Amino acid sequence: MSQLNKTRPEFRNINAFTDLTSYRLPAAGWVSILHRISGAVMFLLLPFIVWMFDASLSSEISHESFTAAFSAGLGFVPGWFVKLVVLGLIWGYLHHLCAGLRHLYMDATHSVSKEFGASSAKVVLVLSLGLTAVLGAKLFGLY
């Protein structure tokens, strides 16, 4: 009976430096936060995405300069950094897509249990990171 009456810790004023560093966020929480971050990354890099799309489709000469940006770079920005930014965009898109499909599935089937939320969040993390690794290997010329 004493275990049932055990009081849980109560946090009224959370200190970001002491409390948040020891807090263990579940997989569903990580997916939720990363879903927001990936959406923000895609939004903030939208001008870069529009430039890439325009440069790849305008003409043959612009397509050559577009592909040269990945090897020679853009102005003072080296080519490897351009590839790294594009890899971040690939991750952002894939994670946002996988997490969005997870949310659509949960909304459509009303599968909102703790167990399904945890397992589907792990699937989203593994799938988005795995697809990013595959496309990143292609981007960096490993195959």
Image: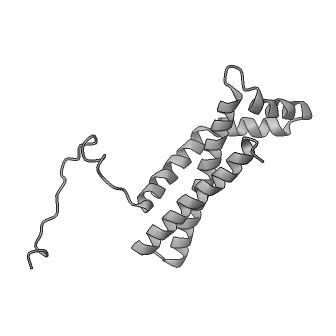
Q: Residue at x 55, y 48 (%)?
A: 38
Judge whether 8 appears above or below 141 on screen: below
Q: Nearer the viewer, residue 61 or 68?
A: 68
Q: Residue furthest front?
A: 142
Residue at x 30%, y 47% (from the top left corner): 20
8 up-or-down from 68: above or below: below
Q: Residue at x 39, y 60 (%)?
A: 26
Q: Where residue 99 appears, x then y in whole percent?
A: 55, 60
Q: In the picture provided, is 80 more to the left or to the right than 61?
A: left
Front residue of 74/129: it is: 129
| Residue at the farthest top position | 76
Which quadrant of the rendered structure holds the N terminus? bottom left
Along the viewing direction, whichever of 4 and 99 lies nearer the viewer = 4
Is 6 located above or below residue 46 in the figure? below
Residue 83: x and y in percent read: 68, 36
Residue furthest left as drawn: 2
| Residue 112: percent from left, percent from top | 44, 74
Number of numbered discs overlaid on the protein picture: 0
Q: Left or right of 32: which side holds 75?
A: right
Q: Position of residue 14 (x, y in %)?
A: 23, 47
Name the side, left or right, on which 62 lies relative to 121.
right
